[in-house]
Image (cartoon, grey):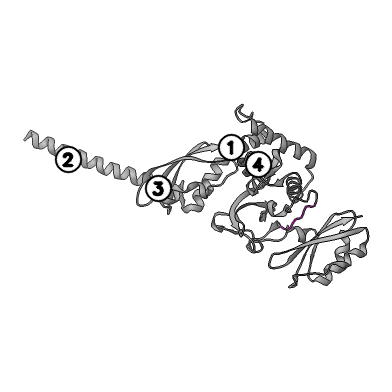
Amino acid sequence: MEFRKRLLLFIVIAGSLSVLLVGVRWLFFNVIKSGDMLDGLVEFRAAVVSDMESGMDDGIYYVKNVKKSDVHNINKYIDSAYGSVDTYRIIIESGEYLAIQLNYELSDNYFAVRKYIEGTPIPAENSRAEQIYDAIAGFIKRNISDDMSVYDKELAAHDYIIRNCVYGYPDNEDDAYTAYGALVLGESVCDGYAEAFFLIMSCLDINCDIVVGSTDEGLHAWNQVEIDSEWYNVDLTWDDSLPDMGDYIKHTYVNISDELLAQTHDWERQFYRVCSYDNYNYYKKSFFMYDSIEEYEDRIGIQFGNHKLIEAAVRTDESTFDLSFLYNYGNISSINYVVEDLGQYKVIVVYLNLH
């Protein structure tokens, strides 16, 4: 009889524990759902990038509608100038969600920006971060003032990076993919241009992202920047002429919409901002946008002076142009020009050789 009582008590206790555990699991899951549950890759990516850029070196994320294969390929879509995912582990796998633990490796970029914004000392082992910091702080001191608009600051950073960096590979080819290559060594590929621009924008408290996509030439990186609550695409690499033209700086890809950029670029749009405005398009903002080639010929003279480059956006179906009329403005020994087709308009960039 005593044995049966003990057995019955054991069954009751075990059943109670089972109910309790189910209840705890239900409560735990619903607490996650109401607060920290992320839905899909887009939210997961945004949370990870945000945490990394705030200096966290690890994190646990509860994510639904994400496959294990997405986790295994995490660094393909987690792109941050401040670091990368070093290790990952799936700690809970249910039919409804994954709990994913990530550890990050913070880059020199993070420490350089934190020093500029907060005055935080850079760790001794991150000596390159000091050089990146010096380059950014020097640029801002020489070129930026408090009375400048966000657009003017953006344009100054765009021109500075292009003027001081050439597209190519330094002795250590890995540096070509970094802001260190662009800002310190003065030589990088698209990743370096995009990182350098991102870091300067961050130090100026201007919202900016790095976009990873592709063009006909292969994988590519550029930026998106926020001005007056509107987001725009900016591609410094494609504004830096090849071969390098030094002070000849064009602005074809300054603040253009997704529609215009899609003529030449491709990217996973669901991971990035929607860029649909043209208020800060360089040519619209500079009044260098014309409705016909005739208007272009009538008004392009306002850009002349001692400029070595003149550029404008023209709404036209023509693809070749007779620009010999430019010699009428005098002091010109020769003219070279390129035409870039962005669908809604063509950008005519004229390189002038002056006497």
- Labels 3 and 4 touching (C-beta < 8 A): no
User: Distance between the Cα atoms at labels 1 and 4?
Assistant: 10 Å
- Labels 1 and 2 touching (C-beta < 8 A): no
Query: Considering only order in the chain, which callout, 2 or 3, is on the residue closer to the N terminus?
Result: 2
Residue 34 on image: x %, y %? 44, 48
As shown in the figure, which amino acid type bears the numbered disc 1? Ser
As shown in the figure, which amino acid type bears the numbered disc 3? Leu
- The residue where tag 2 is placed is 11
Residue 41 on image: x %, y %? 48, 52
Asked whether residue 273 is in view, the answer is no
As shown in the figure, which amino acid type bears the numbered disc 4? Ala
**Residue 345 shown left or right of residue 100 in the figure:** right
Residue range of the region highlighted in magenta in the rendering: 248-252
Q: Quick check: is 249 in the magenta stretch?
A: yes
User: Distance between the Cα atoms at labels 3 and 1?
Assistant: 27 Å
Using the image, determine if residue 117 lies above or below residue 348.
Answer: above
